[in-house]
Amino acid sequence: MSAKSRSRLADYLVYLAVRITVCIVQALSFDAACGFARLLAWVAYHLDKRHRQVARENLERAFPGQYRASEIDQMVRDVYGHFCRVVVELAQLQRRLHVNNWKQFVDMRNGDRLTDALLSDRPLLLVTGHFGNWEIAGYALALVGLSRRFLPPLPRAHGPEAAGQARGLRPD
């Protein structure tokens, strides 16, 4: 099967539509932007039958017999709502979250321990839960000057040697 050819014009028009929408969302108040997110979620839920059905099937398989069809449907609607709200929050992030106000939006428990760990020269692996908009954590850390690389650059070697170097091992 050959790949479907793409229209540069159609791609550009989609880009413009998305960019204009992001500009509008950035200009809205947060409450109005969240209202727009709810509208967008409603539209996406009703237009995106394929993903809606996949989500329903996945939930039915994950929780066999535990939820009524109406409860599963509400969970799927909630996923669309959450995703659209995350998109709106990310669009407004640079406008709303600044070095002077980040504490109003971010709860950094054990912040002193996190800061010490981030500033040390030792490797660090941060594991986060998917509660709320967890993508904001990286942005907030960068705001306070704690931006770090999360993965080391890949070695230039190829094959088994590269895998060994990535683990800090010497090839045999």
Image (tube, grey):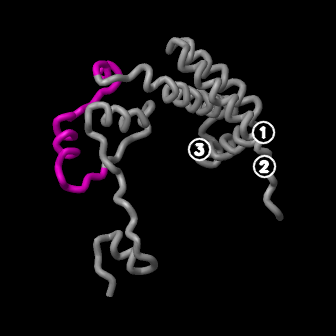
Mark 3 to mark 1 CA distance (whole Å): 40 Å
Report the residue marked by disc 1.
10
Indicate which disc, 3 or 1, sits on the residue closer to the N terminus.
Answer: 1
The CA span between labels 2 and 3 is 39 Å
For the residues carrying marks 3 and 1, which lies nearer the camera in this image? 1
Q: Secondary structure at mark 2?
A: loop
Disc 1 crowd rating (10 Å Cα; few below 14, some 14-19, many 20+) is: few
Q: Counting other residues with Cα less than 10 Å from the Cα at mark 3, is it few (<14), some (14-19), or many (20 or more)? A: few
Give whichever of 117, 145 is nearer the camera.
145
The numbered dot on residue 63 is: 3
Q: What element does badge 3 sit on?
A: loop
The residue under the point 22% across, 45% down is 118
Question: CB atoms at circles 2 and 1 under 8 Å apart?
Answer: yes
Q: Is residue 128 left or right of residue 83?
A: left
Between 139 and 57, the one lying in front of the other is 139
The residue type indicated by label 2 comes to Arg
Mark earlier in primary sequence (2, 3):
2
Q: Position of residue 67 (x, y in %)?
A: 62, 36
Q: Please report the bounds of the magenta region as a residue range.
A: 100-125
Element on which disc 1 rests: helix
The reply to whether callout 3 and callout 1 are in contact (CB within 8 Å) is no
Alpha carbons under labels 2 and 1: distance apart: 8 Å
Q: Residue at x 62, y 31 (%)?
A: 80
For the residue pair 118 and 53, the one nearer the viewer reads as 118
The amino acid marked with disc number 1 is Ala
Q: Which residue is mark 2?
A: 6
